[in-house]
Structures are given as structure tokens and as C-alpha cells.
Amino acid sequence: MEFHKEDILGHHVIIAIDSLALGPALGGSRMKRYDSVKEQTTDVERLANGMTHKSSLAGLDLGGGKATINAPSDFGKGDNNGEQRRELFLAFGDFVESLGGNYITAEDVGTNVDDMEVVFERTKHVVGLPRYPYSRGGSGDPSIITAAGVYQALIACVEGLYKTDSLEGLTATLQGAGHVGKQLSRMLLKGGIEKLIISDKRRKKIDQLREYIEDFELATNEKYNDRIQVSHPDKIYSKKGDIFVPCALGGILNKDTVPVLKNSCYKIVCGAANNQLLDTVKDGQRLMKAGILYGPDYLVNAGGLINVYVELSGRKNGNGYSREAALEKVRSIYNTMREVIEISKIEQIPTNEVADRVAERRVSKAS
Ligand SMILES: NC(=O)c1ccc[n+]([C@@H]2O[C@H](COP(=O)([O-])OP(=O)(O)OC[C@H]3O[C@@H](n4cnc5c(N)ncnc54)[C@H](O)[C@@H]3O)[C@@H](O)[C@H]2O)c1
């Protein structure tokens, strides 16, 4: 692990490069308050290592990296038309540029696409720019590509378990009707899911999802809304279903929820949320013992990363970003998920452990 450090406007910034074995280290810029340099270093190290695994498992020619900025996420937003925030991200862009392309940044928790546009004024080593103006080759909102990847993984899980790719007769329960959840709900309904239970702690999100599905009904002349049922967020784990689809929070798979999911007859957990396992070792094993097939989160939700990889490739070869190319590439998630399920079955180890092994093997082969 390489650490590069700078103070920008009095804020400590660390860029960690975990691995360059497969390609330049890509990972977002996280902006939050840390109590100490030690805490910030531990966080950036863990996150950069996670990116190495994620890129490797997705089969991308990318290494793992991450940046952390020790400042409140709303830093400089209101002051002087955001001039201070702009200054910070211009200097951060210079910092990224000074690493000569070994580190490529993107938005993350606490930073946003506007910040990345500022970074782009100083370095080309930034991805996740808006799609327009088209000439810059930005890939825009990744949610639809992420949802497409989740859908691929989910079908692989269904096939692995039921020996058919049909969703007919199955109930899926969606936790979180946000950007990814909304897109995924359409895919699941179109794919033939019999019942879709949805929940969101914000009522507005449920209404927006229903409206979105109504528009989709109009466009396709199909009836979908009557297959949707709404659940209170606190009751979601005890609703009877087959596939649980976490698209909201981390840490939701733990010693309290896994037994409830088992009692509610769930056979698959596969969704976009990051860090779903509260304890990566114990809860991965707990799911396996409960007879629940788990789609490892960083495999399942790699669509967003694949999307910015396609942006990067388009910029390099001069052809620009292509949404079709991103959608095509995201299909590889299906194959990886199938491979992970097969190894897990043969060796009787949890899918998340298999995913880690497959990811590490590719990195060590390259290095
Ligand atoms: N957007 C992407 O491309 C992408 C890529 C990789 C991973 N992810 C992860 O997937 C998850 C969803 O991403 P998103 O972009 O849709 O986020 P989002 O913020 O748009 O949606 C999350 C939704 O979850 C809801 N929610 C929060 N707590 C809840 C609870 N207890 N019960 C039910 N709903 C609750 C929120 O109200 C919100 O509507 C996040 O964990 C994110 O980190 C997203």
C-alpha cells in the first residue's frame, strides 16, 4: 500500500494506492470528518483494498485506490457561492494529476459530481462525469447499469438454485426504492417476478417507484403495478418471500436478521447495497448454514464500476462513452456469479469467501 499525503486548505488528504498489478488504481474520493490521522489512514487503506478486490473480480484492468479528505461533507457549500469548496477540489485535482495517472478518482460519500467537474479542470484522471456535454465522454448516473448488473447476478443465483432462469412464481422483496431499487423493480417485473414487495423509509420514494412503473405500463401495454405490495421498513425481513434484494443499507445481514430471513423462506439474497454482511466471516457462514444463497455485494453491484471503466476506455481510445458497451460489459457479472456459486457448492465455503479468493488469485497472477 502506497500513501500520498497533502494538506489542502488545512484539510488532511490521503490518497492510498493498494495495487497497480492489473492497471491504474481507481477509487472514489471520500470526504468526511475523521478524529485522527490514524483513523483516516485505516479507513482509506481498507477502502483502497476493497477496490482492488472489486476491480479484479469484475475482470477489469484496474488496480485499487481511494482518497479521503478530512473535512465535513458540506464543507464550503454555502460560503461565497461555494468558492472555498471549488478551491479545495482544484487543489485536489492538482494532487491527483501529480500521481501521473496511477490514481484515478471519482465521486464517493461526501463528494458529488459537481466536485468531480471541478477536479476535471486540473486532471483527466477523474471519472463519473455527467454525460452532457457529450464531448467530455462522461458516463453519468450509473444506477441503471448497476441495476442491470444486480439483475444479471440475481438470474445467475436463480439458475444456480432452481435450475431455470424463470422468475415466474417467485416473490422478490426489495429494501430501498432509491436510484438502483427503482430501476431494478422494472427489470424484475418485466422479467416475470410474480410478486414484488417494496419498502423504503421515505414514503415519497415508494410513490415515485409506483409512478415510474405506471409510466412503464403505458409504454409497454402491460400490467405491473398490481404485482407490487408495500411493506413497512421494519417488517420487511419477516415478509414471506424467495429473493431478498437489499438496495438501501450496509450491515443488514447479521445474527438478528439471517434467522428471520430463513423463517420467512428466503433462499437468495442478492442486491446492490454495499457491505451487507455485518461480520464478513460469521455472517457469510451464517447465511450458508441457513441455506440462503448470498450474492457477494461487491460482485453484484460492480455495474457502477464497470460503467466508469467504459468511460475511461472510451476516453483513451477516443471513441467516447457508450451506454450499450457498458450494458454489454455488465453481463460478465452473470458468469462470475455462476463461477462463484459452483466453487462454493463444490468446496462448501460461503460465496463471499469464494469471491475474495477469485479476486485475490487474479491480482496475484498479474503481480
Ligand atoms: N447507485 C449506484 O450505482 C450504486 C453502485 C454500487 C453500490 N450502490 C449501493 O447500493 C445502495 C443503493 O444505492 P442507490 O444509489 O439506489 O441509493 P439511494 O440513496 O438512491 O437509495 C437508497 C434508498 O434506501 C432508502 N432507505 C434507507 N434506509 C432504509 C431502510 N431502513 N429501509 C428501507 N429503505 C431505506 C432510502 O430512503 C433511499 O430511497 C447503496 O448502498 C449504494 O451504496 C449503488
Image (cartoon, rainbow, N blue to C red):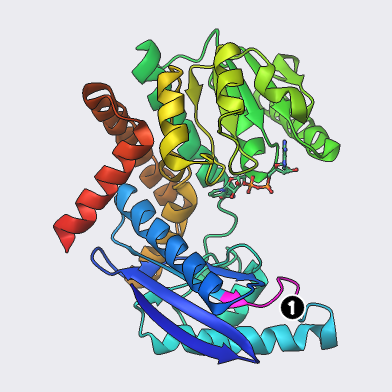
Ligand 1 occupies quarter: top right
- Magenta span includes 70: yes
Q: Nearer the viewer, residue 211 or 230?
A: 230
The N terminus sits in image quarter: bottom left
- Can residue 55 be seen in this snapshot? yes
Label 1 Cα neighbours within 10 Å, binned few <14 / some 14-19 / many ≥20: some
Q: Is residue 6 above or below residue 162?
A: below
Q: Which residues are magenta?
A: 69-75
- What is the x, y in percent for residue 338? 31, 29
Is 229 displayed left or right of 292 in the figure? right
The C terminus sits in image quarter: bottom left
Residue at the spot 31% in from the left edge and 27% down from the top edge = 341
Is 152 displayed left or right of 179 in the figure? left
- Can residue 152 be seen in this snapshot? no
Label count reads 1
Q: Is residue 241 above or below residue 215?
A: above
Residue at the spot 61% in from the left edge and 28% down from the top edge = 256
Is 259 displayed left or right of 211 in the figure? left
- What is the x, y in percent for residue 110? 66, 66
- What is the x, y in percent for residue 41? 48, 73
Q: Nearer the viewer, residue 260 or 330?
A: 260
Give the residue number, with chain letter if any, for mark 1: 75
Residue at the spot 53% in from the left edge and 35% down from the top edge = 271
Residue at the spot 54% in from the left edge and 82% down from the top edge = 13
Q: Is residue 127 above or below residue 54?
A: below
Q: Is residue 175 above or below residue 312?
A: above
Q: Secondary structure at mark 1?
A: loop
- Magenta span includes 185: no
Q: Is the magenta region chiefly helix, strand or loop? A: loop
